[in-house]
Every structure is written in C-alpha cells, then in structure tokens.
Amino acid sequence: MKALLKTAVAVLTLILLISCAVSLPVSSAGKLSYEFKGDEKNKAGFAEGKITLSGVPSGKYKLYWADDEKALDGFYEIAELKANGSFSFKDHNAIPADATKIIACENGGKLVKTAAAVYNIPKNKQLKYKSKDKNYSFMNYSDIHIDEAKNKYYQYSELHFKKALETASKRNADFIITAGDNVTNAEGPALEFNKYQEILSDSDYTGYVYEGSGNHELRKGTKKELLKTFISATGLDGKESTINKNKPYYAVTEPKTGDLFIFMALEFMYSPNEGDEFSKEQLDWFENLLKENYTKNKNIYLIQHALIKGYGAGDDEDNYYTVPLNPQFKSTVRFRNILEKYPKITWISGHTHIALKYGYNYSNMNDTSCNMIHDSSVCCPTILNESSHSLSYTAASDEEYKDFTEGYYVQVFDDASVYYGENLYHDKIYPSACYIIEGTRTSYKPKNNLFESTSTAKADFNYDIASFALMNIEAPKSVSFKNISSNDISELCKKSERLLSDMYSFSSYNDYTDLKKAVKSAPKEKDKDKAYKKLCEAYLKVLKYTNDGNITIYFTNTNEWKNVYAKLFSSKLNNGKNGEKMTYVKKDIDGYKVYKIELNSHKYNQVIFTDGTNEETTELQTISGKDKKLYYLNNNDAFAPYFVYVRDYE
C-alpha cells in the first residue's frame, strides 16, 4: 500500500511539473551586448559604441530603443541585423530620453515581452531625464526654399514647409528656429516671403518662429533692399533700432532659463566662397555677446547658415559641397577664431542640404572647436553622388522624394540638449541622427513661458473706451472686464480670425503669434474675464499694423478706357473677381485722366488695371509700400507699363 501511495505521489508530482513547464513563458536565448566607446563612454545619454546580436535563429531582426514595455513611439528602427550582426553608434549619438532598453524584434514585433533579445541600458548610461522633464523644446529647420519660380529642385518646398509646421504643432514645440535660405529668391524675395507668411499663418502652429538669413536671401537684388526685405518679412527681434540700421543679425533670450540664441547673417555674397561674408560690425557684435554671456550659467546657441570649407559638421574634410565659406578670407578666419575661443557654444548650420543618414551632422573638430550641429533641408535633402564627389538634389526626381523632408526636434534639459533628427513628413525620428550635447547651464529659476515680445512696436495699451474707439473695435461691456460671456469671447475670436487673415504678412511676428494663440485658447479658459482681456490686448497689438501700410496708387488712363478698375492680389487675398472701381482725380499735363485707389500694402502686393469688363488689362504689377503714394505711368513709348515712385503727386 505504501509503495502504491509513493508511486501515485511521484506520478502526480511529475504531472504538475510538466503542467508548470508548459504554462511558463520560454525565455529567449537571444542576447544583445553593448560595448560603449569614446571619450564619453561613462557619461549618461551618450550612445557611442557597438551593439551585437547573438544567440538567435537565422533571420532578420530590427533593433529599437524601448521603454520597459515597448519600442519608443515615433522612432524608426536603429538598424536591421542578421544573427551575429552588429551596429555602431558614432561620436555624440544620443540615447533618447525615455529609453531604458534596446530590443531585437522580428515579424513586426515591438514589445519587450516578445522580443528575441533585450538589452537593459545601465542606469548610469540612461539619460537621467524623461521627455516631460525638458526645460523647453524647439524645432530646428533649415533651407525651406519657398520658390515662386517653380524650379524643379524646390518643387515640394511649400508642401514640405506645411508638413514641418504640422510636426512642430504635433510636438508642441515652444518655438522654431531656421538656419537660413527661407526663400529661394529666383525672382526677388518679396513674393516668396509672402507665400512663406501665408503658409505660416494658415498652419495650426502657435509658437514663435525665429529665422536666420542665408545666402539665398542675398541672391537677386541690391544688398540694401534684400536685407530690408528679410528684416521686414521675418520680424527679427522686432526692435526699431535693428530695422532702421538694416542689420539682419540679432539675439533672443529664452526667459525661463536665460539661454541665448544668436542669429548671425550672411551680408554680402550669394556665393559665400567668393569673398568676405561678415562685416566687422557683425563680428564685433557676435564676439561681445559671447564675452558678456559665456560664463553666466546659460546655454548659447549660434545660428549661422553657411559652413566653412573642410571644417566641422556638414563638410569636415570631405568637401562635397562647392560653395561653403572660404577659409582664406579675413572675416572667415576671424569667425573661426571666435568659435575656437568659445568651445562650449553650439553652432547650428545648414546650406548643404545633406541628408541626415550620411552622419555629417556633428563635429567639434576633435575637441579643438565648438559643438557643431549641421541641419539637412526642409525643402529637399541632398544625397551623395560618389562618382562625381558631389551632392544631388532629391526633389528633382519625380515623386520618389515627395515625402523626404528633414529637420531636428530638440529637447533641452538642465545640463544637456538632445537633437532628434527626423523625417518631418512622417514625424519620425532616425536613431542614428540623434545627438547629445552637454549643457553649460546646470540650473535655472523658472520665469514665464514666453519669449519677450519681438514685434516692431511695443506700445503699452490703456484699456479704456477711447482706446477701443481709436482702434475701431467694439469695447467690452466693462472697462474693468467683468461679467464677460462666452458669446463675447466668441465674437471677438471671429474678429480676431478675420484680422489674422487680413494681416497674414505679419505671421512671423510675435504679436501675430500671441493673437493666434489667444484665439485658440480663449474659448477654453475658465476665467472668461481674464481670457477676454488677454484676447483684447493681443487683438489691439496686431490691429495697429493696419495703420502702417496704407498707400494710394494712381493710374494714368492713356488707353482712354471708359471705366478703370484695380484688381488687387496677394497669395492669399483678392478684392473680388472684377476688382474695385478707381476714383477719378484729375487730368494730367497731356490731358489723360488720372485715377486712384487706396489700399493696405500688407494685404495686397500685386495689381492689374482693367477696363471693368476685363477685356482690356495691363500686365500684373508688384506693389511696394515703402512710399505712401505710388504713381502708375502707362507710357506708350515704354516697353511695358511701370511704376514711378513719387511723394507728392497731388
């Protein structure tokens, strides 16, 4: 009996063991090893090193950055490896915020629990911050190249800029910086900046935008007028002194942290390799800014479009690009010496368009210069042509590269910045194009969450009935903004939206952005009185621009039309299908009738004069607001009608 009992117990035990073995998950035999290398191999967040996959069946496996549960959202795979394959990260490549593991997956899997192999990133190597811990974030774009000449190289520029703004909005980036070549300037930059502003105003993005000036801003036209066009179109730092001095370089301080963004500008040549690009005044200004701020517990970012030949990110020693800054010219030599004197700043450049996949994106010239980050292009990244040792424009190739547009999403933490290189069309990050740069700021005292206003006017508003009457806006029910209703906010939002549409040419100005943001947020605010007051202030600041561009255009009717109409245009607005009938003024010295029309040059920048039936018309003409009156001379002896600028026609 005892023997039978022992046998039964043994059989039952065996059954239980078999049952448990079947129900337990089988642990993978696969292994991921990671050998960290480089001078920063012991520093958190630095990814340089070699990853090796072993112990897995033959096949293809994708490596992903992951948290404790799954692959990080919004990232491409690190690499695709076969069994016993390896992949290496380069100097200053970054371990992303939120990454705690690397996983190897096959058949589309992205979960840690089903991965063929898992590597646990050591605590001391994990970036010690999560994305939510960032001080602020920004998008870093370059070479947008809005193009009204429809050059095949820039055929997707408008689409790609729209996608870049969508990505910035999805990521809720605090602001955008651009590193130059915002327009192509094949026919003059004014109309292209107009299209740039239209796209920006129509986007859902409500953060500030700060533009740098590149070589294309200097492509066609006189230097003085080209620089002034850039300053007017982008707003810069908005100071009257900056605009009046016609200097396209400026600096902006991020107020929460005190971090400094310095925007330099090419000043002289369309081809930077042909001569000096920086004036002594600009280099003095740049160097003095660094002297004043370098040791004051802040990160300093330099945005300057053109790289130096054979020097640093974007080119280094390989020289694929043919028109960089020439290292032999005096201003380039001084510029380089300044960079090497202040090695802890970060210089962000563009110009080559070179695609992020080639890895020409970070350099500090072997610790002899500053940190250098090179951007690709929003419009059209270039690819290497090894046979000719040159770069080829991808956008020239049919629709193959329609979804190819690149830039950086940047997270700034207490003592480090991470640059996530990504495809902006798909809003997806390339792990091998992510870079980390140690910060020079170790702490900060939070202030507000907005940059200082950078619009051209900084008038203080007194909220009384008179001020609203002056601005042609209905005053709120109470000067003290009490008992505001949802309907009051809704009505002012509608007025604000119409104003934003009319004044879209100011879309890069902070005042414009503040109103755009207020329109979006006001209906959601619980404190309606406070929300209405904020909306009023933003409305009034934009409304003042409507008084700035009022001009009169005169037309001499040498065709002796019975009626004269003016059809006004911009890339976004028009004054109706048939235009507007012009007002008769008087006859000129030759007996021809002169007509006039008043308009705002910020709303319209082109005009066609017609006989009212549109059977007879003049050619399309460009309107300029630099003078308050324009006289259109239809001269039969001239090759074509043209404008003559006068100050006192009447």
Image: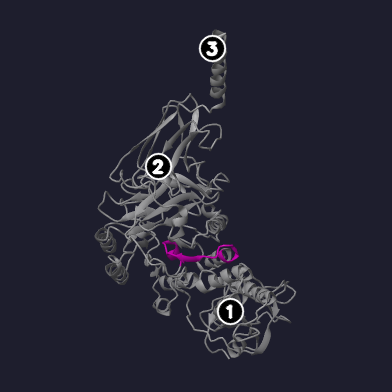
Category of crowding for the residue at label 3, using alpha-carbon neighbours closer than 10 angstroms: few (below 14), some (14–19), many (at least 20): few
The amino acid beneath tag 2 is Ser
With respect to residue 496, does 21 lie above or below? Answer: above
| Residue 122 relative to residue 649: left or right | left
Q: How many marks?
A: 3
Q: Nearer the viewer, mark 1 or mark 3?
A: 3
Instruction: Identify the residue position indicated by label 1 in the image.
Output: 533
Disc 3 secondary structure class: helix
Instruction: Identify the residue position indicated by label 3 in the image.
Output: 6
- Residue 584 image offset from top left, x and y in percent: 68, 87
Give the CA separation, mark 2 to mark 3: 84 Å
Q: Nearer the viewer, mark 1 or mark 2?
A: 1
Is residue 41 in the magenta section? no
Of residues 122 and 507, the one nearer the viewer is 122
Q: Earlier in the sequence, mark 2 or mark 3?
A: 3
| Residue 554 relative to residue 453: left or right | right
Q: Quadrant of residue 498?
A: bottom right
Check residue 388 in the rendering and tell me which mark sits there, or answer none: 2
Residue located 35% across and 53% down the image = 437
Mark 2 and mark 1 in contact (Cβ < 8 Å)?
Answer: no
